[in-house]
Amino acid sequence: MVVLKRIYDPVSEGDGFRILVDRLWPRGVSKEKAALDLWLKDLGPSTELRQWFAHDPEKWQEFKTKYKVELKNKKAYLQEITTAAQQHQQVTLLYGAKDEAHNEALVIAEVLKSM
């Protein structure tokens, strides 16, 4: 099972295998506090796409479309998540965005479901 969670939320035992999917390290979070099992920074949106999107909800649909195109070239990273999900009861994709309805982890989860 794959679930999503902000990296700023407290770590819990139920998180299972914790994977950060942001390209940039989240501000104010120490490596100890993050309690990561894996950081797939290259899975995050390209710098150009991330800066263009700028977490603007009005650009969400276009961002999803463009990011899914980028993800087609990142199948090895997606497979890594799938493998982790098979090996552990739960995988938690972590992201730093404040907006829980418009972030790259949602797109990644959507792509994983369609695999």
Image (cartoon, grey):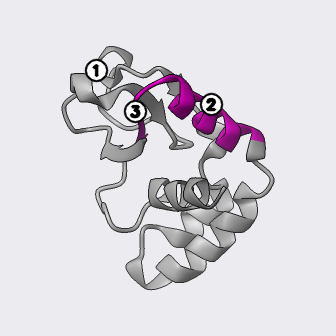
Q: Give the CA separation, mark 2 to mark 1.
A: 25 Å
Residue 57 spot, x, y in % from top left: 39, 78
Q: Position of residue 49 (x, y in %)?
A: 63, 65
Q: In the rendered structure, which segment of residues is drawn in magenta?
A: 76-94
User: Regarding mark 3 in the picture, which secondary structure is present there?
Assistant: loop
Is 5 left, or right, of 95 in this rendering? left
- Using the image, tell me which numbered label, if any, was put on residue 83: 2
Q: Is 88 placed above or below 96 here?
A: above
Q: Image quarter for residue 45?
A: bottom right
Which mark is first along the chain, 1 or 3? Answer: 1
Count the marks: 3
Query: Within 10 angstroms of label 2, few (less than 14), some, or many (20 or more) residues?
Result: few
- Residue 1 x %, y %: 43, 41
Mark 2 or 3, nearer chain start: 2
Residue marked by disc 1: 33
Q: Earlier in the sequence, mark 2 or mark 1?
A: 1
x 50%, y 55%: residue: 109
Looking at the image, the residue that sits furthest to the bottom is: 58
Q: Amino acid at mark 3?
A: Gln
Q: Amino acid at mark 1?
A: Lys
Front residue of this view, candidates 7 and 29: 7
Q: Is residue 84 magenta?
A: yes
Tell me the residue that label 3 is attached to.
90
Residue 95 in view, yes or no: no
